[in-house]
Amino acid sequence: KAADGSDMPSRGTFWIEPRAGQVVRVEFDCGDSSETRLTVDYRKHPTLGLTVPVQMTEKALRETDRWVEGRCEYSNYRRFTTDFRIR
């Protein structure tokens, strides 16, 4: 949804490694002329054995016709575990 609550056109693209069927990148464009683009890169985690996001980039066109870009990187993935006993 747009900031005013109206519907916003969007489209996306997935990059998939064909042999493993593993997603390696997702790109998502929002707005009539792609005013916002989110890109997420994925990699297989060596110890978890799962595909996890490693980086997300967002580019957005502001009212001043200037592009703003932000990037975040993900790390320190851990497997959640729990232990219990039934008495």
Image: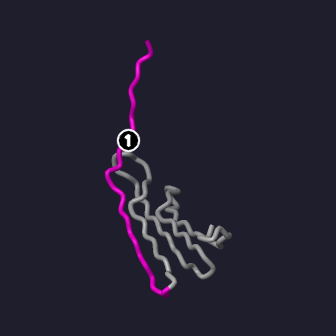
Vertical placement of residue 77 versus 19, above or below: above
> In screen coordinates, is 30 left or right of 65?
right
How dense is the environment of label 1, judged by Cα within 10 Å: few (below 14), some, or many (20 and up)? few
Q: Residue 45's spot in the image, x, y percent?
A: 37, 52
Between 68 and 16, the one nearer to me in the picture: 68
Q: Is residue 77 magenta?
A: yes
Which quadrant would the N terminus be assigned to in this image? Answer: bottom right
Q: Residue 62's spot in the image, x, y percent?
A: 49, 81
Q: Residue 34's spot in the image, x, y percent?
A: 57, 79
Dot 1 falls on a residue whose secondary structure is loop
Q: The magenta stretch spans which residues?
A: 64-87
Residue at position x 65%, y 67% in the image: 5
Q: Residue 61's spot in the image, x, y percent?
A: 50, 81
Q: Main secondary structure of the magenta part?
A: loop
Which quadrant would the C terminus be assigned to in this image? Answer: top left
User: In the figure, residue 75 lies in which quadrant?
Assistant: bottom left
Residue at position x 55%, y 79% in the image: 35
Between 43 and 65, the one nearer to me in the picture: 65
Q: Residue furthest front?
A: 4
Vertical placement of residue 1 versus 33, above or below: above
For mark 1, what is the residue?
79
Q: Residue furthest top?
A: 87
Residue at position x 67%, y 70% in the image: 6
